[in-house]
Image (tube, rainbow, N blue to C red):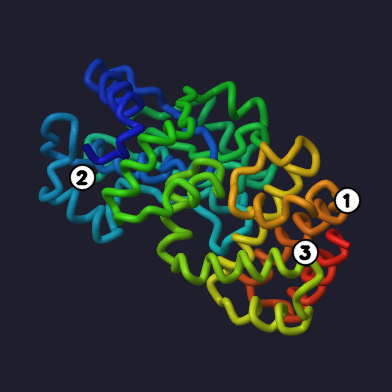
Amino acid sequence: MNCLPWQQEQWERLCSYQEKGRLPHAILLEGPRSTGKETFARAFANYMLCSSPRNNEPCGSCHGCQLLKAGNHPDFVDMEPEEGGKTIKVDEIRAFVTSTALTPQIAACRITLISPAEAMNSAAANSLLKTLEEPNPGNHILLVSHAPWELPATIRSRCQHLMFPLPAKQEAIEWLTAQQPDDEWPGLLDCVRGAPLKALEFQQHGLDSYREEKRRFAALLSGKANLVEVGMAWSKDETGMIANWIYHWTLDLARANESGIMQMHDRELADWLKDLIPQLDSVKLFSVLDKLSSLQQGIRSRNLNVQMQFETLALELMEAGT
């Protein structure tokens, strides 16, 4: 199976549609981030473009599979923002709409992947609407969305919806353990609200670093850390992972502040800050979340003074706890 274990039902459903000649023209794959929706979409595109699929799986060795692996299959269109956080622009969608008049070159169909679909600006979404209303034979569109409510209702109503909920915790832990044995998976999974691919991403950046930065974060809120030293340490991370961790920890604290400490996902952080959490300034916490979103985009585009931004962020976190 080319999909993840918790996606088997969705995989079998689409394969059944395909076998019966009922595969929808446009499919909206929707659900929380880091559940593997794009992994699924790419695997299904591979299956559709394979000339010799076996047991509902692509063969992996035919000309079509090899071209897709090399990234130059003529019947596969991959549409995503050029840079993280940017939009999919109308010119790109217009070029795609024009190309839908073409017949497949080597496969039985043409597959287009748009991910994330909510990255389309309004003009791009309106342009896509034409081909959704008047689909050309042999063209299928897979739209991956973490936030389908941000898409126009006219787009959503013309797609077959395929839901990708979070897997059961035990299933996610079993899969993560198969990737890399580690006793920390339950805690990491809690921290990322049950998203297994995000937990794997966190782990691959080093659990020691993860724990060290979490301690630094807790010390900052408790007023026991130096702002400049914290800002300097955090600004040295060029991957953007520390900003990601801080976002999850801050969101967890905001949840606890609003609904009680038992609602926190990170039990270790909850234990460290249990006496401070009831006193946290929720307005400051949500302000930090807003700043982190901008900071993450800035890190990707490298168009800001990262150390200064982290120092400002550290100050606001300290103020939230004092």
Horizontally, is 40 left or right of 58 in the view?
A: right
Horizontally, is 25 left or right of 152 in the view?
A: left
Residue 15: mark in rendering: none
Going by the numbered disc 1, the residue's amino acid type is Val
Label 1, on which residue?
283
Q: Distance between the residues labelled 1 and 2?
A: 56 Å
Question: Relative to 276, is 296 above or below?
Answer: below
At 63% from the left edge and 53% from the top edge, which residue is drawn? 248
Q: Are marks 2 and 3 in contact (CB under 8 Å)?
A: no
Asked whether 273 or 66 is in front, the reply is: 273
Mark 2 Cα shell of 10 Å, populated few (<14), some (14-19), many (≥20): some
Q: What element carries label 2?
A: loop
**Image quadrant where residue 54 sits:** top left
Label 2, on which residue?
106
Q: What element carries label 3?
A: helix
**Image quadrant where residue 294 sits:** bottom right
- Image quadrant holding the C terminus, namely bottom right
Q: How far apart are marks 2 and 3 (CA)?
A: 59 Å
Which mark sits nearer the N-terminus, 2 or 3? 2
The location of residue 203, given as percent across then percent down, is: 43, 60
Going by the numbered disc 3, the residue's amino acid type is Leu
The location of residue 98, given as percent across then percent down, is: 48, 44
Q: Distance between the residues labelled 3 and 1?
A: 14 Å
Which mark sits nearer the N-terminus, 3 or 1? 3
